[in-house]
Image (cartoon, rainbow, N blue to C red):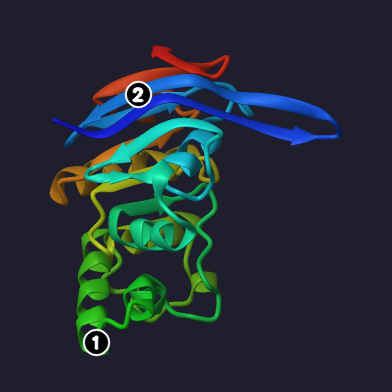
Amino acid sequence: MAFLQITDLSKAYRGQGRALQVLRELDLTVEAGEMVAVVGVSGVGKSTLLHVVGGLDRADGGTVRVGESEVTGLSDAELVAFRSRQIGFVFQFHHLLPEFSAVENVEMPLRITRCPAPEARERASSLLAQVGLGDRLDHRPGMLSGGEQQRVAVARALVMCPGLLLADEPTGNLDEATGETLHGLLREMHARHGLTSVIATHNSRLAGACDRVLHLENGRLRAA
């Protein structure tokens, strides 16, 4: 059963009277529970694809359906609710708030939705334990290594129990050994939380650990 269905997706960026066509009538079907890697050279549009799927950017044409939601037809307010309910994002740079501890960073999405403080803390603490940081709850980002900071970001992405995980070059800012550890963590969390995942990556080993690898070129996807 398809959890993510993309049909005829197009996206261009315009400036100085010119248009750069990034996505061209792109089609993609991802089955529920599948982990798909999207590979391609830098600047080819991998991030744009994830941003449109996750409702961070709008397409020029085509449709994106995630679960029961047709993303391309949602209003701005509906997109905010959709992202909170359905999407977990992991970016190349962790974007943690430096003045807050690890557990406070992870529980932030829950607190924004007015989840009771004890429940938010319990959920955040549990996820940090799952990613191997149960003894780092009160450490601020500056006290953590790059790999540990990205683990916090993974926990934060999962705290709202999303159905779809979108990871944009999640190991791109890490050394090889740390990246390898994060590969295993992403696969473990994917299985443990019953996710459907799309990962944009340059890393061939991370891509190879996915169920399917697709190559983005000239605005369209093909089997790698």
**Within the image, what quadrant is residue 136 found in?**
bottom left
In the image, 59 versus 40, the foreground residue is 59
- Residue 175 at x, y = what percent? 51, 42
Q: In the image, what residue type sits under mark 2?
A: Leu
Q: In this view, does 70 lie to the left or right of 191?
A: right
Q: In which quarter of the image is the C terminus?
A: top left
- Residue 92 at x, y = what percent? 52, 47
Label 2 belongs to which residue? 28
Q: What element carries label 2?
A: strand
Label 1 belongs to which residue? 116
Q: Residue furthest bottom?
A: 117
- Residue 107 at x, y = what percent? 33, 75
Q: In the image, what residue type sits under mark 1?
A: Pro
Residue located 42% across and 26% down the image: 38
Foreground mark, 2 or 1? Answer: 2
Q: Is residue 10 above or below residue 194?
A: above
Question: Can residue 220 be seen from the camera position used here?
Answer: yes
Q: Is mark 1 on a helix, strand or loop?
A: loop
Q: In this view, does 81 lie to the left or right of 68?
A: right
Q: Which residue lies furthest to the right in this view?
A: 16
Q: Quadrant of the N terminus?
A: top left
In the image, 163 versus 70, the foreground residue is 70
Residues under labels 2 and 1: Cα distance?
38 Å
Question: Can residue 171 be seen from the camera position used here?
Answer: no
Residue located 14% across and 49% down the image: 192
Residue located 74% across and 34% down the image: 14
- Residue 83 at x, y = what percent? 38, 57
Q: In this view, does 52 lie above or below 162?
A: above
Residue located 28% across and 25% down the image: 29
Q: Residues within 10 Å of mark 1 (few under 14, many from 20)?
A: few
